[in-house]
Amino acid sequence: MGQRASSTAPSAKAPTARDAGGVGAMRPMLAERARALSSPHAALGSLVETVWTATHLLLYPLGALQPRVGTTDHGYRVEHLPPLQRSRIVAAVAESGTPILLLHGMVDNHSIFTLLRRGLQRRGFTRLYSMNYSVRTSDVRTAAAQLAEEVELICEETGYERIHVVAHSLGGLIARYYVTRLAGDERVHTVVTLGSPHQGTHIARLAPTPITRQLRPGSRLLDELERPSPGCATRFICFWSDTDAAILPASNARLEHPDLTATNVALTGVGHLSLPILPSVVHQISASLTHLDSDGDPTASVTQIPVG
């Protein structure tokens, strides 16, 4: 499994006609996906995806319980870290101590972040929060309003004015809507998205529900997200994989907007549910959220962290 990265800061994107192409437009995309799945990286990724999916199903019932916001320890501890890692963290205590909110995807819960949470804790992050929104959520806008309330609670509890959000799948669109349409950039330094359909997914055509209609390329919701967002203060880091079964085409998980500063990180052979458990992705997230300047800009390069 490999990685490459590129920054879009900012660049124009051609508009997409609403629901253009229909189901027939999926055929060439499926052919391209089949070619991607034939690679050795994809074979390993499929095995990891299968094992993690089975594990996630076992964890899912526990994750259905609404988590307490935050962890049991809201301090920032480094004594358990290796010396090199400890020195890196101590040099950026303020940034590394910023609260992180984990936001799951559709028909899921916070159990999807079980390994990511542990990985971040091992790297010294202890102000970790999770939020469960209803599996019956039918509107991104409603979920974004709920996210806004959760963020305010976290800021009030911790005393921090801004936080980070790490979101999987649909959670990334919810976070993006909050940041760009509900003035959430005043509260969020960085949004990390993992396999989020920023440009929609044709897979959503297969399930005619209110929420999946919003995920179709050219939907009204996606058109709204494409509106101008001048001066948005939040930075985005967006991971996407060429074998993500939930995003068709896979590159639609890239964020390309003329007003938004985004770094798009391409992965090879990683499944949709596996994105939050890949060790190198966990490392990438921790490094990016630790090395921030005073304005919230990532100062660590995302191009020098290999995925293996």
Image (tube, rainbow, N blue to C red):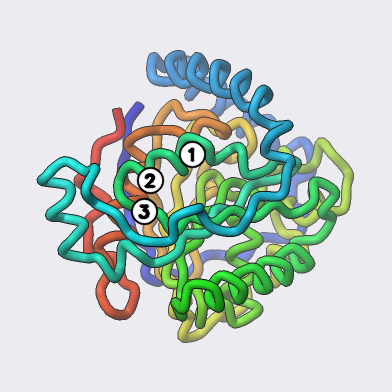
**Residue at label 1?**
276
Under tag 2, what secondary structure? Answer: helix
The disc, 2 or 1, on the residue closer to the chain's N-terminal end is 2
- In the displayed structure image, the side of residue 243 where residue 108 appears, left or right: right
Q: Amino acid at mark 2?
A: Gln
**Residue at label 3?**
125
Q: Quadrant of residue 6?
A: bottom left
In the displayed structure, 19 sits above or below 62; it is: below
- In the displayed structure image, the side of residue 184 where residue 219 appears, left or right: right
How busy is the neighbourhood of tag 3: few (under 14 within 10 Å), some, or many (20 plus)?
many
Q: Nearer the viewer, residue 184 or 4?
A: 184
At horizontal 84% and vertical 39% (from top left) the residue drawn is 207
Gap between marks 3 and 2 measured at Cα:
5 Å
**Residue at label 2?**
121
Q: Amino acid at mark 3?
A: Phe
- In the displayed structure image, the side of residue 107 where residue 262 appears, left or right: left
At horizontal 25% and vertical 74% (from top left) the residue drawn is 293
Q: Amino acid at mark 1?
A: Pro
In the displayed structure, 203 sits above or below 36; it is: below
- Of tags 1 and 3, the one toward the viewer is 3
- Percent of width and height locating residue 142: 79, 67
Q: Quadrant of the C terminus?
A: top left
Gap between marks 2 and 1 measured at Cα:
14 Å
